[in-house]
Image (cartoon, helix red, strand yellow):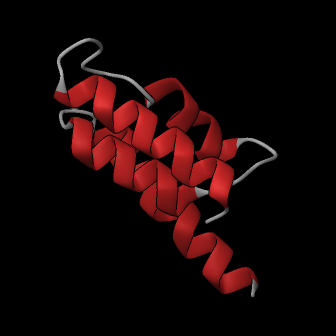
Amino acid sequence: MDERTALILSRDKILRVIGRDPTAGLTQARAWISGSDRQPDAAYAVIKDIGGYEEDLQAAKLAEEKIRQER
């Protein structure tokens, strides 16, 4: 995970913890699953932390497995 991603994760976590945006990072996490900037490990962390988005969580797991197989 690069520094930019780590900063985004931290910012969104703060927004969720203080209650300002309970789903902060969800849109970005979905993009990390299937977009050109594929980072399913980061997406998984965000979606798991938010909770309640089981389909997205499974998609992140599958994307991570696919990347591992490609290596």
Q: Nearer the viewer, residue 32 or 18?
A: 18
Residue 33 image point, x, y percent:
59, 47
Please report the residue visible at 49 percent of the width from the left and 55 percent of the height from the top: 42
Please report the residue visible at 67 percent of the width from the left and 44 percent of the height from the top: 34
Residue 14's image quarter? top left
Please report the residue visible at 54 percent of the width from the left and 68 percent of the height from the top: 64
Left-right relation of 51 to 40: left
Q: How many marks?
A: 0
Of all residues shown, which one is farthest toward the right?
A: 36
Q: Is residue 70 above or below residue 34?
A: below
Q: Is residue 32 above or below residue 62?
A: above
Q: Nearer the viewer, residue 61 or 28?
A: 28
Residue 43 image point, x, y percent:
48, 49
Residue 45's image quarter? bottom left
Left-right relation of 44 to 66: left
Please report the residue visible at 46 percent of the width from the left and 44 percent of the height from the top: 9
Residue 31's image quarter? top right
Left-right relation of 48 to 35: left
